[in-house]
C-alpha cells in the first residue's frame, strides 16, 4: 500500500500560463488580507461542507485523488452527495471513519480495476510486457483500450460480470431480460467496504444518492437523513441501462440517476432549511471540448456533453435563485409588515434567505487521445493516473485559500475553478493496462 500511495502522489507540475499567473496574482493580492488562514480553517466557518460527486465510471478514481488532498488538508465534509460511481465513492467515504477513508478507497478501486473471470492474469501479463518499453502515448492508449475491452468481455471483479445468455432471448421483464451484465457482486462489495450502520446512525455523516424511477422518469434521491440506506440504494444509483439492471426498492424500480441528471448539485440547491454551505463539486465530464475530427471523436464528445448534464446551467440557475432569495429578504426587511397582504407575506417569507453558498468546482480534464470508452477503461494504470490527476488538481486548488473564503451576505453565491486561472497539473503518464 505504501508503494501505491507514493505512486499516486507523484505529480510533475505544468508551467502556469503567463496570463493565468497574472490574473491569479492579482486575485490573491486583493484577498490576501482575508485569506491568511488555511483552507481547513476557512471551511470550518460554514455550517455545512458538502462533497458533490458526479457519475463517470472508471473516471471516478479522479474523485478519490481529490478527496485524498482534502483529507490531507484537514477538510472533512459533513454531507456526501453522489450519482452513479460518485454515489459509490460517497458511500465508501460516509461509511468509514475519516482515518480509514483513503485506504478503503484504494482497496475498493484496486479490486474493481481487475478484470473478472480469471482475466486478471492476462492483464498482469500485459502490464509486465509494457514495463519493458519506454513510456509513450500510443502504448498508453493501446493499453487503455485493452482495459475497456476487458471490461466488456469479462466484467470487473466485485462489480459486474457479463450474462451467459443474451437478454434478447427473454421477454419477462427480469434482470436477465433487461440488462447485459449481472451486478450481484456489487452488493457484497458494498457490504464489505461500507459500514451502513455508521451512515444510518443519528450522528453519522449524511449520504444522498441520486437515482431515477424507471416508470415515472422522475429523479429521486435516497437520503440517510430521511430513510435507512443499504447496498440496494447505492446499486440503484449506479444501475446504468442497458448494461446494468434496474434495482427494486419498496416495489419501485430505479436506474442510474445520470439518466436524468448526472450532476448532484441540484440536490444541494434544493436543501431546506438552507444554511451557509461550502460545496466541493467534482465533475468527471466537461461540457467544453474541441470539435470532433472523426467518428471516434464524435462518440466521445457526445458522451461528454450528455453526462456533463448542463453543470454550468445548473450552477448559474442556482446563483440566480439565491440572488432572488436575498432580494426578497432585503425587500421584506425594508417594507413595513403591516403594509403587505398577509397571504402574500406568507408566500414570500419561505423564499427570503441571506445564507451564502461557495462552490469550489473541479472538472476532470480529458487527455489527448482518450476515446469514448474512457468511462469503462478500468485498468490499474488508468486508475492510478486518474487518481493522481485528482490529487494534483485539488492540491493546486488548495494553494488558493481565498477560494474558501465565506462570501459576503450581499454576494449570495460565489464559484471558483482553479483551471480558469492556471493550467492543470498533470503527473507523468503511467501505463494504463
Image: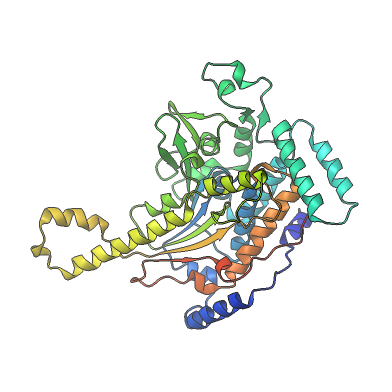
Judged from this view, the residue extending furthest toward the right is: 132
To which quarter of the image does residue 289 belong? bottom right
Q: How is the image coloured?
A: rainbow
Decide if residue 432 is in sight here.
no
- Judging depth in this view, the residue of 95 and 143 nearest the camera is 143
Query: What residue lies at 53% left-to-right and 41% top-to-bottom?
Result: 196
Q: Nearer the viewer, residue 180 or 252?
A: 180
- Left or right, 190 with reference to 218: right
Indicate the position of residue 322 as horizontal and vertical percent values. 34, 61
Q: Position of residue 355 (x, y in %)?
A: 34, 64
33 over 397 or under it: above or below = below
Q: Which residue occupies 42% across, 40% down?
A: 219
Depth check: 75 or 164 in front?
A: 164
Q: Position of residue 224 (x, y in %)?
A: 45, 44
Going by the image, does 412 lie left or right of 153?
left
Q: Is residue 125 above or below residue 165?
A: below
Residue 61 spot, x, y in % from top left: 65, 50
Q: Eyeballing the image, is 216 above or below 164?
A: below
- Residue displayed at 46% across by 72% down: 405
Q: Say whether residue 339 is visible.
A: yes
Q: How many marks?
A: 0
Amino acid at each position: 500500500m505504501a508503494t501505491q500511495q507514493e505512486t499516486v502522489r507523484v505529480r510533475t507540475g505544468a508551467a502556469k500560463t503567463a496570463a493565468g499567473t497574472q490574473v491569479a496574482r492579482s486575485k490573491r493580492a486583493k484577498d490576501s488580507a482575508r485569506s491568511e488562514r488555511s483552507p481547513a480553517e476557512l471551511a470550518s466557518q460554514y455550517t455545512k461542507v458538502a462533497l458533490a460527486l458526479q457519475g463517470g465510471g472508471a473516471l471516478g478514481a479522479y474523485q478519490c485523488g481529490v478527496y485524498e488532498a482534502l483529507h490531507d488538508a484537514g477538510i472533512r465534509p459533513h454531507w456526501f452527495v453522489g450519482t452513479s460511481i460518485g454515489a459509490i465513492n460517497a458511500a465508501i467515504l460516509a461509511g468509514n471513519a475519516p482515518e480509514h477513508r483513503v485506504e478503503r478507497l484504494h482497496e475498493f478501486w484496486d479490486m474493481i480495476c481487475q478484470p473478472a473471470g480469471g482475466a486478471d492474469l492476462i492483464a498482469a501479463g500485459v502490464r509486465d510486457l509494457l514495463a519493458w518499453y519506454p513510456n509513450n502515448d500510443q502504448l498508453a492508449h493501446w493499453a487503455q483500450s485493452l482495459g475497456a475491452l476487458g471490461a466488456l468481455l469479462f466484467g470487473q471483479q466485485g462489480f459486474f460480470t457479463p450474462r451467459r445468455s443474451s437478454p434478447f432471448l427473454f421477454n419477462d421483464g427480469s434482470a436477465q431480460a433487461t440488462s447485459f451484465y449481472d451486478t450481484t457482486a456489487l452488493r457484497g462489495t458494498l457490504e464489505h467496504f461500507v459500514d451502513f450502520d455508521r451512515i444510518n446512525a443519528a450522528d453519522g455523516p449524511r449520504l444522498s444518492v441520486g437515482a431515477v424511477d424507471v416508470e415515472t422518469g422522475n429523479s429521486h434521491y435516497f437520503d440517510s437523513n430521511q430513510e435507512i440506506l443499504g447496498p440496494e440504494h447505492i446499486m440503484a444509483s449506479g444501475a446504468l441501462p442497458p448494461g446494468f439492471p434496474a434495482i427494486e426498492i419498496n416495489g419501485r424500480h430505479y436506474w442510474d440517476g445520470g439518466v436524468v441528471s448526472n450532476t448532484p448539485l441540484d440536490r444541494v440547491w434544493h436543501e431546506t432549511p438552507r444554511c451557509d454551505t461550502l460545496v466541493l463539486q467534482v465533475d468527471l465530464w466537461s461540457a467544453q471540448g474541441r470539435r470532433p475530427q472523426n467518428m471516434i471523436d464524435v462518440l466521445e464528445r457526445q458522451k461528454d456533453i450528455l453526462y456533463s448534464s448542463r453543470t454550468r446551467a445548473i450552477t448559474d440557475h442556482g446563483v440566480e435563485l439565491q440572488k432572488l432569495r436575498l432580494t426578497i429578504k432585503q425587500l421584506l426587511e425594508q417594507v413595513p409588515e403591516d403594509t403587505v397582504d398577509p397571504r402574500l407575506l406568507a408566500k414570500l417569507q419561505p423564499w427570503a434567505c441571506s445564507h451564502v453558498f461557495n462552490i469550489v468546482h473541479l472538472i476532470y480534464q480529458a487527455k489527448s487521445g482518450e476515446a469514448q470508452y474512457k468511462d469503462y477503461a478500468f485498468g490499474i494504470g488508468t486508475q492510478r493516473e486518474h487518481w493522481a490527476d485528482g490529487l494534483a488538481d485539488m492540491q493546486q486548488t488548495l494553494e488558493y485559500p481565498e477560494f474558501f473564503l465565506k462570501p459576503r451576505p450581499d454576494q449570495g453565491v460565489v464559484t471558483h475553478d482553479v483551471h480558469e486561472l492556471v493550467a492543470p497539473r498533470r503527473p507523468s503518464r503511467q501505463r494504463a493496462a
